[in-house]
Each structure stands twice: as structure tokens, then as C-alpha cells.
Image (spheres, rainbow, N blue to C red):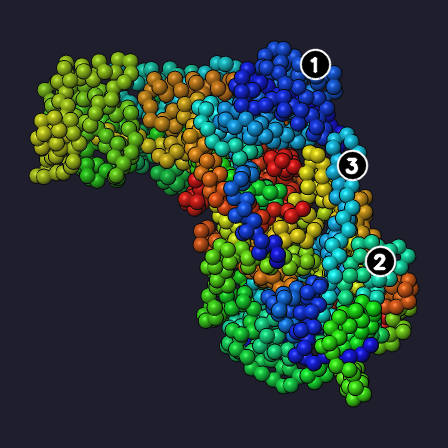
Amino acid sequence: MSEVLEAPVQAKKEAQEFEPKIVAFLCKWCSSAGSDLAGVSRLQYPPNAVPIQVMCSGSVSPLYILSAFNKGADGVLVSGCHPGDCHYLKGNFFARRRIYLVQKLLKFIGLESDRFRMSWVSAAEGTKYAQVVADFVKDIKALGPQRKLKAKN
Amino acid sequence: MTRRAGVFVCHCGTNIAATVDVKNVVSELAKDDGVVFSKDYVYMCSDPGQQSVIDAIKENQLDSVVISCCSPNLHEKTFREASSVGGLNPFQCEIANIREQCAWVHKDRAKATEKAIKITRSAVRRSLRDESLTPLGVPVTRKVMVIGGGIAGIQCSLDLANAGFDVVLVEKQATIGGHMLQLSETFPTLDCSQCILSPKMVEVSKHPKITLMVQSEVTSISGFVGNFKVKVHSKAQYVDPEKCKICDDCAAVCPVVATNQYDVGLTGRRAIHIPFAQAIPASYTLDEEACLGLNPVVCGKCKKACEAGAIDYDRKPTTTDIDVGAIVVATGFDLYGKDKLGEYGHGRYPDVLDGLQFERLCSASGPTGGHVLRPSDQKEPKNVVFIQCSGSRDPENHCAYCSKICCMYTAKHATLYKHHVPDGNAYVFYIDIRSGGKGYEEFVQRSMERDGVMYLRGRASKVYQSKGKLKVLGVDTLSGRNVEIDADMVVLAQAMVPSKGTAEIAKTLKIGRDKDGFLAEAHPKLRPVESVTGGIFLTGAAQSPKDIPETVCQASAAAAKVIQLLSKPELEHNPAVARVRESHCTGCEMCVDACPYEAITLVNGKAHVNEVLCEGCGTCSGTCVRAAIDVKNVTQLQVFEMISACMGG
Amino acid sequence: MDTILKKERLGEWVAQIGSRARVFAPAYADGIWNFSPVAAGVSIELDHGNTVRPAKGFVFPQREVLYRFRQESGKAPELTETLPDTTPTVVFGVRPCDGRAMVRNDKVFTCGFKDPYYSARRDQVVFVGLACNMPPSQNCFCLSMGGSPHSEDGLDVLMTELDGRYHVKAITPKGKAIVESGAALFDKMQVPDGNAVAKVHADADKCPQRSLAAMEKIAAGLKEHFESPKWDELARACIGCGACTYLCPSCHCFDINDEITGNTPLTGERVRTWDNCQFPDFTMHSSGHNPRHDTGARLRQRVSHKLLYFVENHNMQQCTGCGRCISHCPVGIDIVRVATEVTGQ
Amino acid sequence: MVAIEDIRTRARELLEGGKVRAVLGFRRSSAGLLAEPTFVTELNDVASLVWDATCVHNLALYLVNEKKRQKAERNPDTRPLAVIAKGCDSRAINVLLQENHIARDEVVVLGVSCEGGGVIDVRKLADVLRGKEATAAAYEGLGSVKVTTASGEATLAASDVLADRCLECATAYPSVSDVLFGEKVDERGFSSRFAATKAVAAMTEEERSAFWDGHFERCIRCYACRAVCPMCYCDECVVDSTSFIVGPTTTAEEKANRIRWIQRSTTPADNAMYHMVRAMHLAGRCVDCAECERVCPVNIPLRLLNTSLESEALEMFEYTPGTDPAQPSLISSFRDGDPNDFVR
């Protein structure tokens, strides 16, 4: 119980120098290419989000997301091709449904809904990717560290 | 696990080095488990850079290589090739993108370096579990099926056959030729359609490499690129083309009259008939719906009349299994349904015609022997109104798109009419005139200036009949006047829509269609004649409205793509495909439902991946709740390790 | 050492103890009785049913870190010992069946090899028992197991509720210490009090309980019927969960795992966690062979361990008849019935 | 009203005809009020079958467990199993059919309608009885339950003692059955579907967070929830510390490469992880028989995790688990119109 009581206090303390850890699952064809474009265009965004390239957002298992939180992620981003643009025709449609459920479940157990996000970023949307990450980092900084699913040891 | 990884960090001049402390990345990664070699270099992609990878692999017996540099889209190929030169399996070389995804987007050197370390480390963790893969070789059947015997299908078949491939040309109707066979003349040269088409049709029928199947339809398909198995259903051929002498004795005695679809209902024909004089195969054909019942007791006149003994009522429909390596879909177009164009009275008033009916009226082989006469009273029409965009460019009520060829064929129709009836008046309602194409614009201008066709800019709003006369209401937006024209005949330039068969074939072949129902190409610009399914190609008006030159052009393009595909004895396929852990699979079929490529089937109760169909997207593994399916070299274990690496652990 | 504590003084006594030690007592929350920390100034009510979770967790927690490790690639690992935090702890409201279970756990963890983690806790935890004076629960059978509603085994103090007062008996030096620390609050015990206590205990003994007939024959019977087809029959409904053993006050099997917390450098903890003979992986060999391959074999192991093997090793049943495994079994598997049916008593 | 004699008669017929290898049903238990599962194979045991408000178990579980058992046997009896199934249990059977885990001809479903009732929640009953222990609970007409205790009989309002899942149940009769006992009753007038879930969803984020932290912290990972769930039929679970599906094809590397998604340690975080993963894996598969919640010794309201997703599935995807074995599963299908505005 004690931890739950202390948590908010600690959160406030850490909030100032707090740098969120974020895992970003990017599909190879759209979102990863989009973040490449952000690079080519030299757009600046916070370095908190470390990208993991997957073939398709459809391959992102709920376990990946939960595991990232368990390993200490303060936020998790899943990004894929816009509906209809999936390189694999419909992988992102399956992803959308699955991710929606994960998000609802996390919300239901009281994890701040701002900690888990899905976005559509096409290969042409470098600016959007930069924006998505910037917003995400900003929102998570406001929340402080994630403790609910983080392994305690 | 005692793997030996090598890490190579690129400065990319100062592109990376300016923001990322490259030396630090190298020294940090050197501490990692499994990393036995690590170095940095100013330009890894340069020859010395690549050479250093090759040497390091040899000298340190590396079995995993990670290049920490720019986006994999740029140099993954480069470094995988270098790796294989060094004797490493190319699939055990991974790229860590620390330029586009790190150095270029951050300023804070410390933080960028920390991130670069995480990105590189996660690539190392992945590479340490990369298995050696070899591209899959797939044998191919060097035979092609072309579906649809219009000009697109004919051209494509001939090109393929002349390139030495066996071709099966499947046509639903009793003759090939398609809509082009119905046309009188063709723009912009006004040369006779049948005169340029017939020789090609004959060539098809004579070509040793082409098997022609008329009155036939594809009913099912299985297999995959290079190895399709197709079922073709053919109607019973009561008249044997080999024996038929086209003497017309049978039709002469046939008691049944049916409407002639080739004349778009303007004439009738017998139950036993020949669609066109130039039909290929050159044979009469028996319309079983119309025939009194294929029964000697009831009728049987034609059988008696036929001296060649070409008629056999006992013929049965057949189903043929055909193995092919590639399929070309050329199912063509239909005209936008007249029922949907009530405002123009099409179907209600006999003298409101569609474009194809008018073609038949102008055609020497048509119902009027090439004289433009009104269907209602066989009189020569003096005022003919042509209405463009009937059903096109009207997102509210009809088709949103432009059917592209109507401007030209309306100009052609008006011109032809003036040639037939020099003292008549031809009015054209148009929104815009789109006459891009060699000699097109000149042709339109000629129709106005030389042949005096009257163009009215505006939509015709209504066609109605009063006191037996057709009246066309419209507006001339240039003069701003409402116009009302008494017309003897109205010709609608109806929108082109995909042929009825297109929807069915798309379903059978499991290929996509766009919002308008036309076949969807793999990429609108770069892969215009391929479907998203490997080995299935598109051509002609079934893919989008187009005229004859463009169709022929696209048909040859499709042929070239097929030749490219089938020219190799074996196809190469990316080996990073899904793999089932049978021990964990319970056969729940979720992956089967989720696979975008129908690559997974149940084989005695377990999921089975057809590696050739699999594109490695991993939707299956994202769906499986039992971790029973994984994509090689992007396994859940690898992702798991990448996650911990990203978390700094 | 016997004394009397007026009920209204219980709070004071607990408060006194609370100033020097962590205090736990049964509390009803979220629909179950559980040992919960007693916050300062909060008085406790000792009128509870038995807790769902036994008291064993205070000395044998479900998760115990044995040591931490850290290893730079290529270097030797550095280990750091982590002995349990040994803040004195006093647990009120321990039922005699749980107390007797402590005696069993002591046999396992302190006879022969002395487990430092267990012992460190055992020395610091004071178990204040509470004799049962209300009708036993449906599945109580402590008498059959040689215990009683007022057994003192394994307890440091035994309290018996009289009207308006508690009889408080210190049994061990640890027990004496906490009673003496509050001496001022206690009254001297009079002769009538003694009789009252005796009566409460006697009445409790008379309460009807479930019982294993011919207890003395059970051990031999289990040995004899090791191969009995009854095992499979009785376990056919078993779903293979671990409720029975995790809730058992005397089950003590554990597993040891390394929990990796980081790979560069390799860091982590070696952790001891409860294990469970009802789980399929309990006796799983790396070859894939599992000697106890089905629920029948696992049920037999659990029952035999309680009523046969432990008797052979320590000359006492391991089971103390608390009845938790019966009451909480999702499918009504009942150790009393199982033992009776298998041995044909 | 369902007459137990009808069920017994049918069971007798099936056994006499040798059509089934066993009839899976309920009988009285020595462990307490609730009935217990029984495998009736002998005609003279048919009389032990009971049907009342204490028949809480979802016997579909045993279709799964018996399959595993059969695999181990040398020459297994392959005749079908007859199983008594309530509405929820029958939905579970439908999901097992949908996932090809069992074939339709492997089971004879003796469907029993709960009509206007349902099953007892023993914890609610205990609260109502204030410590008195019930020895019998019979369903008595619409909306009330007759409970017998040492000190006599009491008739209680069903809404006070029935399990939440029954009060919220929308189809309290079998959706698949070979024989149906009792009437299909649609208008039951208890609580509304997902009422309990909505109550939690209505809390503030902080409240929900604290609510679940408190519950997860209590979890002892006995896995009763998993073991009792007919849908948790994987041979190997994500929380298992060792890979114990080991066959001739299993390589040493496979064993070594077992992913440790979740530690065995009962820390609040890892407990939460376990329950999250389980809920996700049950999305579109859980039929709300709520056995997980009933068997939880530390009384974690586990059912809510599953119903929260079930309600989403219904509202957003018009998907109800266990209604149609022919349809693709919730997460192995999609519609173009699926919610999209939650995506940035």
C-alpha cells in the first residue's frame, strides 16, 4: 500500500528534472520513413522517444506495449500507415482495433490515457511525426514517471 | 548463446559526428555482451568503410554485424552485400539508424548520444538473434492466362505468344473482339475499326501458342505467383467451330428470334446465329436460352439443315483445370446504366441512343447498313443532339470521375453524322472538351470548323417528348441563354464503368478494386499494370477508362511485365517470412483470418504458412494469443530484447 | 504466565506495542479477512473468522530476495547479500491452526539446515494467538489433526476471549516480553478466571467438526493405496490451480529464479518465491518428462505430503486442519473426503 | 421451471445408449454449499445429478481439460461428452467451436436455461447471512432464492444473492444446445448489462488507479482464474517461467529462449501485467461466465477487466463473443468504420 501513497509526492519531486522514457513502434513503410523525412528536413524534436522499427503496425502485439511499460517506459507510441495506405493492405486495420482495446483496458485500470498513443504517420509526414513526438513528450512530462506497470526491482 | 557481433559506427562526415559522440557509442557498445568488435569510421558506406566490415568479419569470425549509420532505406542493401562478401549471411547484418532518427533531429549532444547508444544496442540485440536465411526459390509455370478477349486481351495475348509463351485467352462471349468490334470508325483517323481489329483476331485464332476459350469464365483460382491453378467453366458448344461452314442454312430455318446484343438491341437475330461476320472463332453459335430446348422433338430444324453436321444438342458444359504462372485481367468496360439516366429518357424514348448504338447505326455491318436512321421510324434525323458527360463528372448523382474518351468519340459521332447527313444539324452539349492526345485536338477543331458541328457549353438538363418530338432542355453557359432544341435523335455519351464481369473476377481472384469499381493497381504511378497480388496483372478499361491507343499500349506493358516475371526459371522471394511453432499452435485460425495474403491455412489442425505468399508483415504474430507464430528475424523474442535495450537495460 | 486484559484496554496494549513494532491484525476488506497493518491509534476487533491467507507469509514471504548480482561483460559477478528487514513485528489474531503450522514450517526451515532468511524473520515476529470460541467453520478439522481450538503450539501468546475480558497467556520468552511490556494494563488472574478459561476451551472442543475417522490408519492407508485409481477419479475435476497450497499455512515449497533487471552490465536479483506442487511445471524435467503428469498424481502428492511423508520425516501430520484448501477449492476438492475415500476408511 | 428429473432422464438415455462416454454435470459437495462438477459414467450415479442455484461452474472447461487428458491416454474413448450448460457456458462452447478447439460432434450440449434466475454468489450470501452458513440454496420462482441454514430457512431477494454476471446477463439461456431444458426468458428485470463495469469506468482516473492497485497488490498468483477459464486452454502461458511444451522437435535453444514477459514475483506491477495480458488475450473470447472472479481466493473483481473489453467490443464493433462459431474472432477481423478518432 505504502508505495501507492507515496507515489504522487515522489512524482511531484521528480517532475522538474524528469525526462520521459518512450518507446515508439514505427511501421517500416510509412511511419519509420516519415521519421526519416523528419530527419532529412532537419526538424527538431525531443530525443526521448527511441524508435523500434517493425514491419507493420499490425505486428505490434499487446505484449510489446505492456512489456515496454513493465520495463519502465513512461509512454508508448505505436505508429502506422494511414487507413487504406497500409503496405500490407490491411495490417493497420487489425492494429487499430487491437490498439483501441489495449488503450481502453489501460484506461480502465487507471493508467493515464496520455501514456499510450497511436498515430498515423505517412512517409510524407515528417512534420507530423516530429509534432506527434513533441506533443507526446510534453504530455508525459506533465504526468511524471509511470509506476503502475513498471517492475519494482 | 555465444554469438560474435561487430558494431560499426559511422560519422557520416559530420552529419552524425556533429551531434552524436561516435567514440562514446563505440566504447559503450564494446562493453555489451556478445560484442567482440567495434569501431567507428568517417564514411562507412565508402569503399574503405565497406572493406573494413569485410575484413572485420573474416578476422573476428563475426556472425552478426550492426552498422550504426543512416536509414536502412539508403544503405541496408550496401552493407548486406558487403557482409556477404565477407562471408556472413546478409540477413545477419542490421542497420541502426542514428542519422535520420537521431543526429539530424536533435541538438543536445549528450542526449542524442544516449539515444544513439540505445538505437544501436537494440539493433545489436536483434542481430544477435538473427538467423541465416536464404531467399526462397519458386519454380514457375511458363504459361499465361489472359481474361477478356477485347482489344486489350488480344494485344496482350499476341505480345506474350510472340515472345514464346503459351497463352490461354478466356472470353465470356461467343466471339473475341469486345466493344471495339462494335465500333464503326475510330478517332482521330476515322479508320474502320473492324478493318484494323479483324486481322489481330484472325492472328489470335491461328497462333500456335494461343489457346482460345470462348463462352468461358474463370470460376476459381488457387496457388500463387508463378503457380496458379485456375478452373475455367465453358458453356456447351452446340456448334462445332471446326465443322461449321458459316453457310447460314441453320439460321435460315431457325424459328426463334431474339434481340441481338451485338447491335445493342437495335435488331433481332435467330437463336442460332453468328455474332458478327468476322467472329472468331468463325462459327455459328446456339443461344440456349432462346432455343426451343435443344430438343429434336420440339424443333431440331437447324440440326437437320446443317449439312456439315456441325450441330450437336447433347454437348455439355465443361470445366477445365489450367496451370498458369501469371494472369492478366482485361475484362473491359460497360456503359453506365441507361436506367440510371432517367432525366435523358434513355430506354424510354426509342430515339435516345447510347454511344454504342450510334456506332452500330454508322457501321456498314450494322442494322442500317451504315445509314443513320431513327430506330422509331427509320427516317433520317435532321437534328441530332449529343450529350457529353452523361453520368460522368457528376459526384452528386452519378460517377465522380471523367470517362476520358467521350469528348473524342462524341466529336467522332458528330463528324460521322455530318458525313452521313450533310444537311443535318449536330449539337453537342459539353462541360469541357478534353482532347489531349496525338491529333485529338485537331480532330475536334475540324469537327467544328470543317463539319460545322455546333458545340454548346453546358449541361443538358432534360430530354422529354412532346407531340411525338424529342425536346432537349439545356443551358449555353457561354451566352448565358437557356436553350431548347427539337431533336430527331439524342445520343448520350455515357460514362464508362467496369464491365459487370469485373466485380466477379476481382472477387474470384481476390484482387482489389477502387472506389469506382475499377481494378486497383499496386501503385497508381509506379506499378500501374500490377495488382497487389503477385502474378496478377491488369490492363484495359477494367483498370480505368481509356481509349484504344492507350489500351493497346497498356496491354503491351502488361505483357512486358509478365515476360519479365516468367523469363527467369525461378522466382526469388524474401525469406523473412512467418514461421509457426507447431507445438504452440492450437489451430484457432485467427492468423488465417488476419493474414492479408491468405498465406496461412490449416494443415491437420495447425497453421501452415505458404512462404511464397507470405510477405512477412507479422499481422499473424500480432494477432496470435499463443505466441505460436513469428516472423523470422523479427521474432517476438527479438522485439522483447529490443524493448529492453531501448529502456537502457 | 497467565494474566487478564479488559477488552477496553486491548487498544492501549496494541498502541504500546505499535510504538516499538509493526502490528498486524485481521481486518475485513474487499470481502475477505486478511492480516493488515494496524495504523497508530486504531483499535482492533478480535471477532474475526479465519483469514484467507495464512500467517506463514510473515516468516516465509511469497517473494524473498536472496541476493543481488552485477556483472560487467567478461568480469566475475559481484554478489550483494540481502538479509530481510527485521523490524520487530507482532501479529494478533492468529488462529491455533496457523500457530501449529509454524511448528511444521520450523521443522522444514530450521531443523538441520537453518535457513537464514526464515530464521531472521521468525526471531522477530511475535504470533499472538486467539483461541477459537465460536462455532467452527464448515471445513474446520483441527481436532482430527491432533490440534485443538486453543492449541498453543507455535504461538508466542494465546488469548482466550471471556466475557468482556481476554485471558492472555504468554508462552514463549518473546511472548512474555510483549506481555510484560504492557504489564500495567493487565490484571492478575483469579481462580474463577482459570475455570472460565477451561470452560471456554472445553466448550470449543465439544463443537462438532469434520473429522477423519481412524486417523491413525490414514498414513499407512495412503502408503498402501499409492496406486489407487481413486486418485484420478477424485482429481478429475481438479483444474490445476494453486489455491489450495498457496493458502495452506504449512505448504513451504519454493522456487528460485534470477530476475534480470539490466543487461549492460548484467544486473539482477536471485529471488525465492513460493512454488506450488499443483502447477504442471512443478516437477517438469527439462527433457519434457513430467513424473507427476496429471492432476491425480499432483493431488496424491499434496495429500500424501500432508498426511504421510511429513509423518514419516517429522512424526506429525503437516496438515493442521484449518480447512482453507477445502473452502477455497474452486471445484470442491476436499482433503478430508479424499483421504477417507482413498484409504477406504 | 427446470425439473432435475428431466435432465436425469436424458442423461440416463445417453448413457444407456452408449452415445456418450460421460455426462458432465453437478452434484452436491462435501466442501460446502456450492455444487461440484461430476463426471457421470455409471447409470446408478445419474441420481446424484442436481440442478439449482448452486451450480456455478462453467463445465465447458472440462471439454478442454478432457481433451488434454485424452491426448495422454493410449487408446482413448472417443465418444462425445454430454455437458450441462447454462447460457454463459454454452457461449463458451461456441467460442471453443469457433476456435476449432472442439468439434461439434464431440459434445452433446444439455442446455439449461436460467430462466428468471441465475447462480449464487457465496460472498454476497455470506454478507446477507451475517456469518450463518447456508447448507442449501434453491431457486424459487421469479426473483427469489430459498436458503437453508442451521437455524432454518429464509427466502431472499435474488438481486441480493445472485452473482453480478447473472444479474447483468442478457441471454440467460443456451445459444447452442442439443436439448434445451427450461424456457427462454428475455425479460428478467435485474440489473443492466455491464452495470458493474460502468460503475468502475465512472470513477475518476485516480480512483480507478487506486482501486486496481489495491486489488492487484493482493493477488497471490495462484492462477485459479486462469485454470478455471475455458478460454485459457494454451498448454503454455505467458507467465510460465519455464517452457513446458517440450516435444521431440523442441530445440535446446527454444527452451533457453523462453521469453520472460512477466516475472513470477508477486509484485503489484507484475501482478497487474499478468491480469492485463490475460484480459487482452480474452478480448472477444471471454463470455462472462465470471468463474475467474468466483474462484479468486482474494476476491479480485477480475470479471470487470474482461467485461470492460466486452462492452467495448459490443459498442464499437457490434461483437458479442460466443454467439456465432462461424464468424471470425474480434481481433482477427476489422471493419473500415472501426473507431479512428482516437488515433493522432
Q: Which residue is mark 2?
A: C109
Q: Among all residues in the image, which is located at the extreme top?
A: B47
In this orientation, does residue A23 appear? yes
Residues beneath discs 2 and 1 located on the same chain: no
Label 1 marks which chain's residue?
Answer: B
Q: CA distance from mark 2 to mark 1?
A: 59 Å
Q: Quadrant of residue C25?
A: bottom right
Q: CA distance from mark 3 to mark 1?
A: 33 Å
Where in the figure is residue B217, as x and y percent of width and height?
Answer: 45, 33
Q: Check if mark 2's residue and mark 1's residue have beta carbons within 8 Å.
A: no
Q: Which residue is mark 1?
A: B55
Left-right relation of B364 to B595? left
Q: Check if mark 2's residue and mark 3's residue have beta carbons within 8 Å.
A: no
Q: Among all residues in the image, which is located at the extreme front?
A: C184
Rate crowding at label 3 as few (under 14), some (14 to 19) or many (20 or more) other CA atoms within 10 Å: few
Q: Quadrant of residue B506?
A: top left
Q: Secondary structure at mark 1?
A: helix
User: Given the image, on which type of amino acid does mark 1 rest?
Assistant: Asp
Q: Which residue is mark 3?
A: C77
Say which of marks 2 and 1 sits in front. Answer: 2
Count of numbered circles in the view: 3
Where in the figure is residue C186, as x and y percent of width and height?
Answer: 74, 78
Rate crowding at label 2 as few (under 14), some (14 to 19) or many (20 or more) other CA atoms within 10 Å: some
